[in-house]
Image: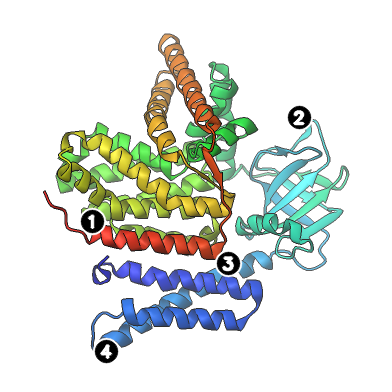
Amino acid sequence: MDWQNHPLIRLIIPFTLGMVGANLFITYMNMAVLFILCCAFLALSFFFLNTSKTYKGRKFGITATTFAFLVGMTLYTSKHQRIANSIPPNTTFCQGVLTEAPAKKPHSWALNLQQENGTHILLYISPLQREHLPSIGDTILASPTHFNSTYICPDDSFKTYHDYLFNNGVCATAYAPSGRWVIKPSHTSPNFLTSLRSLQGTLHTIYDDHGVNGEAGAIIEAMTIGQKTNLSKETRTAYAHAGVSHVLALSGFHVGIIVLMIQVFFFKPLLSLRWRWVNNLFIIAILWLYAIITGMSPSLVRATLMFTILLLCQSTFRDNLSPNSCALAFFIMLCINPFYLHDIGFQLSFIAVGSIGVLGKKLIALASFRNNLAHYVWLITIIAISLISALFTAPLVAYHFGHVSVLALLSNLLLFPFVYLLMFTSILWWAFLWCPPINNLLTDLLNWTANTMNNISETIASIPFSTIEWHPNILITLLCYAILLTLTYFITHKKTTL
């Protein structure tokens, strides 16, 4: 990669290191760790971040690097302190607005309460009949018998769960039995986001009333409206072992398919630059409308924001997935929420998108011209994207989940046409909801597609050694990515001969 032509890449490295350094300092309270990290990124700046060989150029590069590092550290620390200080010490009272439907647990109901400062409290209440539960938008007042801050974890066995809650803006967990919590009548209408949460339940009811139910219905709802509560454990496991669990959650994968469908439908490659601007703005409007209709789930909002930035950059720089546009999307999203850095979906999305942007065109060119397979360019594109995505996300998946799907490439190639068919059919399904004969045919097609996807995933997952158990530590994971980046360098600098 030519560092001089990718200035944003050179800035997000110290920006991200600043956030990582802040996290290490807060976690270990060790200034030595922070000092070593500062020395490391300053050393890198001499090699990659100076704009010229003159003293003035090196001075500007180091100054910009230091500023980016400090901005990242400041943003992360501010976010951390806001959540950590949301609950006063020794508090025995909490209040918040219910933002999601109550979740059924083995011995309680979980209520996600949003406080005035934007942080959340996870309140568990004693079992009740569903009709007595609060609704989205209700204000809950509680005097819990147990109140635990997610910032302080007395038992290390729960530290991973506490960190997960804290990184998702949950400042505390609490338990309130009957008689220790009440619903405060609200004289105002529900806000925009709470109304969207209830809209997702309405969409689920419409699906169920029109014959989209059972295990096939659970797959369809997960892939179209983001409703995953009805997915069975067996289905989740089969998709995970087949290496295609990403299709079950509304994320960048689904948003990418929607963008591809719209671009193909409107013949975007044939449009002039002026009309591409209009086309991209139209796509962005559709993406945000879709995010609103499906309840603005965090993963979908993140993916929609990422593709919004990428489409705007594409209109400006005339490049679909340039490293600079990916870096800009990465930077803006971390400025909005520094804790996205801990989100597995965020990490996988940018690793996949970034690797495809850097390697995709090169591999397609090598396969198409050197092997005289240009007339199979569509198939080559799918294979290249699947291969790159599976290869670059494998170390991170193994680090977080402890396994690698050996047949992930095969699973993606087999499922991709069905995912495309399911999403396109679901659009037609909603469009012809008013016409029962056509809607019934589309219902049968949807159920058949979902059942076929289940059969493929279960068959691949049942193949011996389809999944390898692997638990790499952080150093091994970084070493794997160092090797992948080295290979990327040699591939991208290799000239394509026709």
Residue 486, compared with residue 251, is above or below; it is: below
Label 3 crowding class (10 Å Cα cut-off): few <14, some 14-19, many 20+?
Answer: some
Q: CA distance from mark 1 to mark 4?
A: 30 Å
124 relative to 494 in the view: left or right:
right
Residue 63, compared with residue 399, is above or below; it is: below
Which residue, given by chain and number where applicable, does mark 4 sit on? 56
Question: Residue flagged by tag 1: what amino acid is it?
Answer: Thr
Residue at 23% x, 51% y is 362
Q: Is residue 58 visible?
A: yes
Which residue, given by chain and number where applicable, does mark 1 sit on? 316
Q: CA distance from mark 2 to mark 4?
A: 70 Å
Q: Is residue 284 visible?
A: no
Residue at 46% x, 12% y is 440
Which residue, given by chain and number where applicable, does mark 3 sit on? 79
Circle 2 — which element?
A: helix
Circle 3 — which element?
A: helix
